[in-house]
Amino acid sequence: MTLIKLEDVGLKFRVRRAGKAQLKDFLLHGLFRRSKQTSFEVQALEHIDLEVGEGDRLGIIGHNGAGKSTLLKLLAGVYPPTSGRRKVVGQIGALFDIALGFEVDANGWENIMYRGYLQGETPRSIREKIASIAEFSELGNFLNMPVRYYSSGMKVRLAFSIATSIAPDILIVDEILSAGDMAFQKKARERMKTLMSSALAVVVVSHDMKSLALMCDRVLWLDHGKTRMIGPAEEVIEAYTKQSDKGEKRQAA
């Protein structure tokens, strides 16, 4: 069963230029015409064809700025495609930027509810999970405090505990998550293994080629927003690694 299908998908962003129009632009080029455009387009993704089916474990690799995280957000529905077609069957659970977006004046309990709603929970379903989320976070009485007083590690603990309380059909992960101290990181890794094994399909971005080779059966190599190669994990990772090594040697020469 196909769970994700992208057909010739493209994504453009319109970016505003920094700064304001200068007085000389109006004097030299007229009141209603400027010499410089106030915005420009960026082609983030182009001609992406992809199918992810039940049982698939897909890794996404590429250099920084290749469009990996952008593609994940398009798959998750954060960005709609500006061209082509995106089709998704099933519930998506997306784990990226998990520590962003807290209501800092609300306490931990309230943020569990807020973020639960953002993940598609209902008031009833999040109430059923709230005790287990709190227990996994190990924050105890700190949950009664406003989040603005949390350390960065505490925020990540809480965010990770909320984000991984879901049981999605399709799990989308941006990098392999780490949270808290060594003991908590061990718990986090075990929970990620459970999530990945229970999901019908997994799509993960990582720079850790060894982990991807172990976790994934297929890998998509993105290069400047386009598909460079897609296929069996070992073959694509080997080709990407060779190309990266050549680039490093050219820079060193």
Image (tube, rainbow, N blue to C red):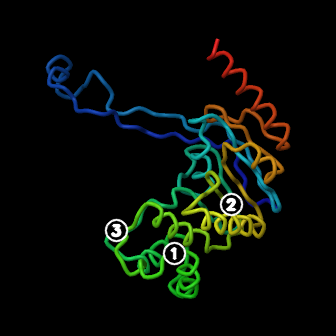
- Residue drawn at 51 percent across, 75 percent down: 116
Residue 180 is situated, as x and y percent measured from the top left of the image, at 54, 63
Q: Mark 1 points at which residue?
A: 116
The answer to whether residue 56 is left or right of residue 122 is right
Q: Name the residue under label 2.
A: 88
The answer to whether residue 199 is left or right of residue 109 is right
Q: Nearer the viewer, mark 3 or mark 2?
A: 3
Q: What residue type is labelled 3?
A: Tyr
Q: What element carries label 2?
A: strand
Q: What element carries label 3?
A: helix
C-alpha distance separating marks 2 and 1 = 21 Å
Front-most of 167 and 84?
A: 167
Residue neighbourhood size for the residue with mark 2, other residues' Cα within 10 Å, grouped as few (<14), some (14–19), many (≥20): some
Q: What element carries label 1?
A: helix
Quadrant housing residue 84: top right
Residue 166 is situated, as x and y percent measured from the top left of the image, at 63, 73
- State which tag comes first along the sequence, 3 or 1: 1
Residue 227 is situated, as x and y percent measured from the top left of the image, at 71, 36
